[in-house]
Amino acid sequence: MTKRHLVSVAASALIVGSFATSAAAEDLTLCWAAWDPANALIELSKDFEAQSGHKMKFEFVPWTSFADRMLNELNSKGQLCDLMIGDSQWIGGGAENGHYVKLNDFFDANGITMDDFIPATVTGYAEWPKGTPNYYALPAFGDVVGWTYRKDWFENPEIQAAFKEKHGRDLGVPATLEELRDIAQFFQGREIDGKTVYGAAIYTERGSEGITMGATNALYNYGFLYENPEKPYDLAGFVNSPEAAKGLELYKEIYDTATPPGASNWYMSENIDAYKSGQVAMQMNFAFIWPGVEADANVGGGKSGYFPNPAGPAGQFAQLGGQGISVVAYSTKQDAALDYIKWFAQPEVQSKWWALGGYSALKAVVEDPGFAASQPYAQTFLDSMAIVKDFWAEPAYADLLLAMQNRLHNYVVAGDGTAQEALDGLVEDWTEVFEDEGKL
Amino acid sequence: MTHSLIERAAEGTPPGIAQKLRGLSDRSIAWIFVAPTIFLLLAVNIFPLIWTVYLSFTDYRVNRPNRDIEWVGLANYERILGDAGIWSTMQATAHFLLWTLVLQVLIGFTLAYLINKKFRGNDMWTTIIVLPMMLSPAVVGNFWTFLYQPQIGLFNYAVGFVTGKDPASFSMIGDVSLAPWAIIIADTWMWTPFVMLICLAGLRSIPDSIYEAAECDRASKWRQFWTITLPLVLPFLMLAILFRGIENFKMFDLVVQLTGGGPGNVTTLSSIDLKREAFEKWRTGYSSAYGVILFVTVFGLASIYVKALNKVKER
């Protein structure tokens, strides 16, 4: 046995020993959304079971009903979940309503520091109040809205020539949202390989959070701000600035002129289906889908490319997705749940997490020299994570989100009123929510 | 000597209990039998109703367990009744309710009338027609989203085939003017068989002798329909309208699956809006007031309707 092997064995024994002594073997239930990364987590967690003796059970709920189901569980102080990989916007409610265990002491005791994680994920998934060192989650899955495109179509000489003839420039990855609109419009209704194809699949879903997660990628880049940076909860002129309205108009223009027929209630899965079936040249979607795209028989294996959300006049931003992992305060197995978090935070586990298709938020993984070249989408993930913005994470986030869903869908899909009216209405709705909350 | 089951049970009852039971009046024994049911009704119906009415006067939010509950009087009711958004969901509900009832009654009665005629394969057709109502509304909503797909949907294809229109040129669930009809069509497809079955029961309850007497009096088929069939089926028809009206007033699953309440808010029915307020925004006090208003509306309308139904029955 080599010296290196001996060290590995000793390290493994130490880890196993530390888990074995910290808590009796328990059946732990981890709650998350039902999607591809959840399957990767099941695979990853087998190592934890082997090392700790704890048994892992999983409760996965489809995204469209994930918030309903899990927030019901938390609000009713249910004991179904010991660990919760909750959406980033839940962190405020999780902290203020006592659903999540505060992890500061645990992190200090176990040498886990938030400096080791991508700053945007710490702010987005772990901190409450934002910008303060109060941690209620460990960044578990970094995610961000980005774009997938048909590289094979973009590189087709005939299509390239047609695009150049129409726009006077080369067909390539769009640098701005206006260029993206032009490209999407160019592909709309075009015949490729004997099939009619369309421009882009974008988020338009009404029921949960879809259209908000989509339209914000245009709004941010045209100047939309959630509040006055100098004065919290001061909304007028920031949410509904004329520049923000232009961003919303652009999103509607893309919806009206460059999406497939019937794309009025589309979110992640519908966009994936449209893209994989060869209906669209581009799709907006969270980065979690990229491993699946690469592996797909129709559009994978080099046929697809990836790019971050393009810039607008006010800069380049992208909607943050992703989640942190928290210990549920109502769990009777908190020690074992903390064991899981301790195990999950280890660099070697995080490396394996990335290799299995989970997006690690640990700097040691993403800043590794080989990371950018490790997958065709790795560099785009890094570039996208550097430009993220997130929705409100207030305890009243659901009220704020539903109001935005309503206003955006009414304007973008139903065509009711103008973009300016939609955003003015949003200011009214949000003001009412903050007044109810006693924050205004 | 043979003993009945009751006699054997009486013999098996300990003398003390038997003695006590013997001393009870019929009324007391009746109360003992209905007490568990009454207790259950109080626990799962009446108490939650009273509790909901109480909550409707507060600002309680179930997701803020640490916040004090304040008595807000009629503020929730005033806010709801002055909210233009809620009136638009009421309008959407009324539109859905009216057209589903009209279509289901017309088609359901017609189908029942046809099925009531003796013909070969009668039973098989009845079974085929009632199949949709045996499916789960969520399943129906899901597959109608496929039928309405502009590119691959059978519905669009059929409309395109009949009208010559490009199937991809219209979207039943994405168009503001078509979406309300999309949910009406799906609901009508699913629930017309229910109306048909009730009408069929009504039609089969009419004695043949009445028609035979009418034939002797040389009454035409048209006259028989208006003076015999329709008046005698009317109570059944009204009952079907009552059931479907109550069901569609609280319609939720099929529409959520089909349109999610969109585009915009054009198919956001009251029940969908109420669910968003109660279990997405978690405004428990406000949504309790909303629920009370809907309950009073349905209860009031149903009471008036039942009175009318009783009058029809008495005729």
Image: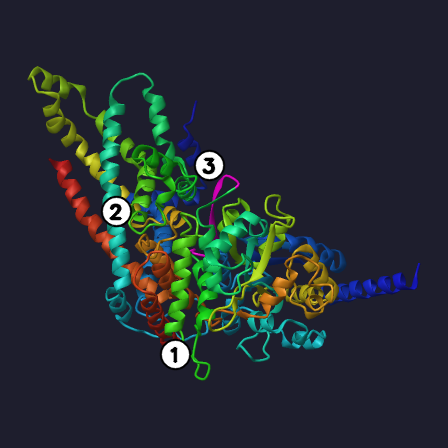
The residue drawn where x is 87% and y is 65% is A7
Structural distance between the alpha carbons of marks 3 and 1: 68 Å
Marks 2 and 1: same chain? no
Viewer-closest of B123 and B45: B123
Viewer-closest of A285 and A35: A285
Q: Position of residue B297 (x, y in %)?
A: 23, 55
Label ID, residue A262? none
Q: Quick one: which residue is furthest to the left in this view?
A: B217
The chain ID associated with circle 2 is: B
The chain ID associated with circle 1 is: A
Which secondary structure lies at badge 3?
helix
Crowdedness near tag 2: few (<14), some (14–19) or many (≥20) residues, C-alpha within 10 Å: many
Which secondary structure lies at badge 2?
helix
Q: Position of residue A405 (x, y in %)?
A: 40, 62
Q: Amino acid at mark 3?
A: Gly
- The residue singled out by tag 3 in the image is B12
Name which of mark 3 and mark 2 comes first in the sequence. Answer: 3
Q: Amino acid at mark 2?
A: Leu
Label ID, residue A438? 1
Q: Which residues are magenta?
A: A193-206
